[in-house]
Amino acid sequence: MVRLLRFRDFRLLWSAGLISMIGDWALRAGLPFEVYRLTGSTLATAAYFLAGLVPQVLFGSTAGVFVDRWDRRRLMIWVNVALAVALLPLLAVDALGVWIVYGAVVAAVILGLLFAPAQIAMLPQLVGSEHLVEANSLSSLNQNLSRLIGPALGGIVVALLGLAGVVAIDAISFAIAAVLISMIPSRPSFKPTAPALSHDAAILPADSALSRLVAELRDGIAQASASTLLMALIVFGLITSVGEGVLGALFVPWTTDILHGDNLVFAALLSTQAIGGLIGAFIVGKFLRNASPARMLGVGALLFGLIDLVLFTYPVIAPVIWPALVGMVIVGIPGTAMQVGGTTIQQREVLDSHRGRVIGLLMTVMAVGAIVGTSLGGFFGQTVGILPMVVIQGSGYTISGLMVLLVARRMRRASSATLAIDEPPISTEAALASEQ
């Protein structure tokens, strides 16, 4: 797995992601806690997360279209520069009020909608399809390192310098990431391969820009609909994002009101899951690089959900902190397998010319689910109660993990039946299923 870091271009992209995500996690450790501290309202905390979700619904799929039009390397460079600038208004939160947080979050999320699909879509050009599981494992390692370092750094900086300190760290991290990505030599393959539209979606040059945009969006939906595995992934994303939305709105209140922790405990909880994630990244990259992505996704989600159900309900019996920290470490292991499996499916099941749109579609669906979950958490957290609501998250992962495993099983059976009657060569999707 680590051998991929010998490739200079992949190493530069990996390092840029690590640095920028450390800055992101440092900010995440301070910003939502600051909102809750200033307002004391779960609704205000939910509004913070909604500010990051609404743009994903409105612009997620559209951003994918432009990722499939533009050079992905250049796009990531300029997005990092713009992100550094977009964070600066947060320095005035004390003077202008908490509303400035929502505006800055919206701007940052819109820019991030361009970056994330471009990064996922460009990765096969850097390492090749045969190394995608290893590369995605390293990306997961990257994310977990940043999650381990960033919140701890953010908690310390907020305590010493306040919110302005973590804002400065995040802005600088984006600037460094832009420089590192600019060091990757430009190549034609960083621009998506033609054709961008299928025959059915083809349009004339005289058509309007809006017509072209709509046609490309429809073509991306058609690409996703043609794959049973991609449709299962989209349903999985919708179900689990509802639970994540509930937890996102209630994680700080759960930490303070149920677990009786403070800002440092909140930062520690964010960091400790990364320890299990690091272990999981090593296991996946070392031993599971030839495993079925669908099976990694399904089994990982099933275990993740069951562990989370225990993790968030045990304080009813014993509201002490150390079991939560241990549970966060353990849950990070299946969480990594789940993440790597899902990302690899997106990369292998989609043509390069459509990858941005399909990833954008998935992001949009997940944002819709997260908005529903965040709204439920914000409103019912104060009436139904925090603890009854957070179990939705673990239940969602358990159910959707079983669903993915069932779909994968049916695909294997269909593939075996096709081979048994000596049909013509099976499709790419069925071939993937037979490897599971």
Image (tube, rainbow, N blue to C red):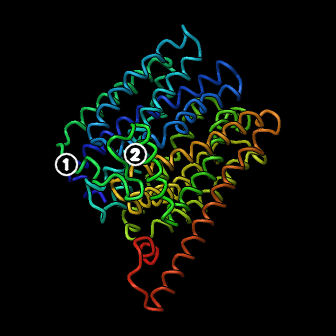
| Residue 130 at x, y percent in the picture | 30, 66
Amino acid at circle 1: Pro
Give the residue displayed 34% in from the left and 46% down from the top.
204
In the figure, is residue 79 to the left or right of 233?
left
Nearer mark to the viewer, of 1 and 2: 1
**For the residue carrying disc 2, how many other residues have a C-alpha within 10 Å: few (<14), some (14-19), or many (20+)?**
many
Asked which quadrant contains residue 20, the reply is: top left
Give the residue displayed 44% in from the left and 53% down from the top.
219
| Residue 435 at x, y percent in the picture | 42, 76
- Disc 1: which residue: 188
Amino acid at circle 2: Pro
Q: CA distance from mark 1 to mark 2?
A: 18 Å
Label 2 SS: helix
Asked which quadrant contains residue 71, the reply is: top left
- Disc 2: which residue: 117
Give the residue displayed 73% in from the left and 49% down from the top.
313
The reply to whether discs 1 and 2 touch (Cβ–Cβ < 8 Å) is no
- The answer to which of marks 1 and 2 sits earlier in the sequence is 2
Q: Is residue 349 above or below residue 241?
A: below
